[in-house]
């Protein structure tokens, strides 16, 4: 692949830099970089960068493997509305905009406007050495929860954000490699993964 | 359907439970025609493998008939007779593509349970083998949900008896790969600790892979009989010696066996101080595995030799003889079996009559008799060497 000029990680750092700048400008601040928590996880997936980028780039598909997301709806070319399960029922919603998008390399987004869940994230796609697929790296920054807002953050990332990102990535890998999210349930009613939005890629194998 | 369920330490019962369904569209449902109790099931029975839940259905050695297929299943159809590998593998991740099906990245939904202990997620999901290994319902039942139907189950030709091929699900390929991990060279002496069902097939495999001599270390009379008469092994009864390593050295012209295979695992019946200390520590949960056999294999192996561990271990051990392992330049291999990789070749060898697949079966029972069968197999009473059950 071509990373001759700039590594994709530099691109990711650029995305973060933008978030920090927006913090300084005040009005559109989403994440207070000085206080933000960061979760970073990666997985190696035996699919091409192009395939993985294409799936992720369609944000509306993210609820297929992200446990806490109910839906993501495109509102324009660069904005979307996200809805996540809130603890104790109901949903919490926020708007996000695309802040960096390099085909087959990086997608970065951040929440915009007034929200109880200021957050920014990026996902990068790089070739694993030796034709062993693609390294997918997810970085999420979020402001530490305070008071009742903590509940909203929990709805975004679960009670253990690090673990949640790891789990979501694992499910992304399952979906991309096998076409389904793994379950050991013997019956449909016992299948915890049935709460995921119906996977449209179930026919990957065909 | 009726199914054999785990109810607690050394407590099994046969219960009526809801039938399995097609949950994912690559699943098939298999109606079980024959199923067996594996020696490794005894680690669950004795509760040395943790993350068991009351009501879990056991069994990972089974075969039967496909009675239902998911929309995305291409190779199998209703009515096919199949034998099912005990590890569940997706067939698409890097490890599966490399043939290391037992390390499938995707088939174990609970892989993270092992992450702190093992430094990586656990290996493939396994039918009926605790929640750490995926929490799948097992094959000691009338019906089983089998994920990735196009990857695991292998069709069996008409006219072949169940008992000829049932053990392709686990113990035959497991014994075969145990011998392969020993990297046997022509003329090698191969010593197998444990003449149980896996040892039985490891010994036969060792001959087929070029061994010049096979030695079996065992104490149970029925197993000794099988090892001697069917597997053509020389026998060492470890109850008869205080210094097994020295005895093996004397038997091998002072060198030690070239290949040492541990087909015993975490519940070894050693004796002497170290084994007693292991038992105490394991009972107190200070040490999870009794390591008698591992230590013996390393001490006994010839310089430049190989140690192959196929007996199951789950945790950490004390007093691993790393110095001997280093000084002798040993190689070691371990792990669950990559059953899928060997099935076509081993089916051919079975049909050619290269393996004796039936002499080890001491008991042919019904599923309803499972609780007593577990007790009998665990206690090695009634000459029990292998139990096959039919629903």
Image (cartoon, coloured by chain):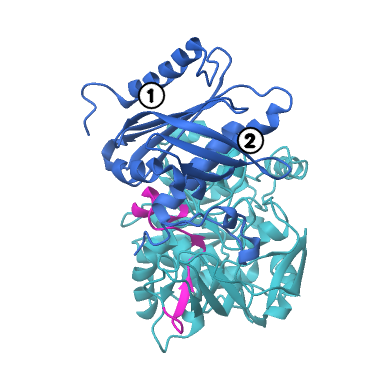
Chain colours: A blue, B cyan
In depth, the one of B165 and B267 nearer the eye is B165
In depth, the one of A30 and B381 nearer the eye is A30
Q: Residue furthest top?
A: A24
Q: Which residue is mark 2?
A: B318
Mark 1, residues whose alpha carbon is within 10 Å: few (<14), some, or many (≥20)? many
Q: Mark on residue A12?
A: 1
Q: Mark on residue B73?
A: none
* Chain hosting mark 1: A
| Residue B376 position in % (x across, y down) | 73, 71
Q: Please name which of the two marks, 2 or 1, marks the residue nearer to the observer.
A: 1
In depth, the one of B256 and B98 nearer the eye is B98
Secondary structure at badge 1 equals helix
Residue drawn at (47%, 61%) of the image: B174
Q: Quadrant of residue B155?
A: bottom left
Viewport quadrant of the N terminus of chain B: bottom right
Q: Judge whether B61 appears above or below B327 on screen.
A: below
Mark 2, residues whose alpha carbon is within 10 Å: few (<14), some, or many (≥20)? some
Give the residues in magenta: B77-102
| Residue B231 position in % (x across, y down) | 47, 70
């Amino acid at each position: 692949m071509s990373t001759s000029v700039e590594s994709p990680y530099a691109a990711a750092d650029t995305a973060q830099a933008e978030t920090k700048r927006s913090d300084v400008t005040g009005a559109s601040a989403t994440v207070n970089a000085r206080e933000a928590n960061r979760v970073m996880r990666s997985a190696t997936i035996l699919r091409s960068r192009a395939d993985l980028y294409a799936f992720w780039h369609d944000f509306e598909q993210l609820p297929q493997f992200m446990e806490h997301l109910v839906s993501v709806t495109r509102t324009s070319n660069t904005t979307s509305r996200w809805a996540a399960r809130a603890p104790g029922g109901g949903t919490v919603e926020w708007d996000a905009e695309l802040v960096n998008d390099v085909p087959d390399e990086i997608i970065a987004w951040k929440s915009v406007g007034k929200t109880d869940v200021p957050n920014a994230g990026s996902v990068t796609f790089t070739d694993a050495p030796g034709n062993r697929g693609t390294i997918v790296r997810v970085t999420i920054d979020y402001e530490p929860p305070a008071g009742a807002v903590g509940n909203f953050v929990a709805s975004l990332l679960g009670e253990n954000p690090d673990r949640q990102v790891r789990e979501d990535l694992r499910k992304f890998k399952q979906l991309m490699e096998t076409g389904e999210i793994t379950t050991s349930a013997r019956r449909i009613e016992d299948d915890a993964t049935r709460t995921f939005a119906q996977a449209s890629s179930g026919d990957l194998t065909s | 359907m009726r199914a054999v369920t785990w109810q607690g330490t050394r407590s099994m019962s046969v219960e009526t439970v809801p039938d399995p369904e097609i949950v994912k569209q690559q699943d098939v449902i298999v109606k079980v025609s024959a199923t067996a109790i594996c020696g490794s099931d005894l680690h669950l029975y004795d509760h040395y493998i943790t993350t068991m839940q009351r009501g879990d259905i056991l069994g990972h050695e089974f075969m039967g008939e496909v009675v239902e297929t998911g929309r995305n299943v291409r190779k199998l159809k209703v009515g096919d007779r199949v034998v099912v590998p005990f590890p569940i593998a997706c067939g698409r991740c890097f490890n599966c593509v490399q043939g290391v099906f037992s390390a499938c990245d995707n088939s174990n939904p609970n892989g993270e349970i092992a992450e702190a202990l093992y430094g990586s997620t656990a290996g493939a999901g396994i039918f009926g083998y605790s929640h750490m290994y995926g929490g799948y319902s097992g094959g000691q039942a009338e019906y089983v949900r089998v994920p990735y139907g196009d990857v695991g189950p292998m069709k069996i030709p008409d006219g072949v008896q169940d008992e000829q091929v049932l053990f392709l699900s686990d113990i035959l390929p497991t014994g075969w790969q145990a011998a392969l991990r020993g990297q046997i060279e022509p003329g090698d002496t191969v010593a197998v600790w444990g003449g149980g069902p896996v040892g039985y097939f490891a010994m036969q495999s060792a001959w087929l892979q070029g061994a010049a001599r096979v030695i079996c270390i065992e104490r149970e009379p029925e197993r000794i009989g099988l090892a001697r008469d069917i597997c053509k092994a020389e026998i060492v009864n470890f109850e008869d010696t205080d210094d097994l390593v020295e005895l093996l050295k004397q038997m091998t012209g002072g060198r030690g066996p070239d290949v040492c295979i541990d087909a015993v695992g975490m519940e070894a019946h050693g004796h002497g101080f170290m084994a007693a200390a292991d038992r105490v520590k394991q009972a107190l949960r200070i040490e999870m595995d009794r390591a008698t056999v591992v230590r013996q294999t390393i001490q006994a192996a010839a310089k430049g030799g190989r140690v192959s561990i196929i007996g199951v271990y789950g945790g950490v051990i004390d007093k691993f003889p790393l110095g001997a392992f280093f000084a002798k330049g040993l190689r070691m291999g371990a792990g669950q079996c990559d059953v899928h990789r060997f099935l076509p070749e081993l089916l051919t060898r079975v049909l050619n009559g290269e393996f004796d697949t039936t002499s080890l079966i001491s008991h042919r029972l019904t599923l309803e008799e499972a609780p007593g069968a577990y007790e009998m197999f665990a206690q090695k009473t009634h000459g029990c060497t292998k139990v096959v059950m039919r629903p």
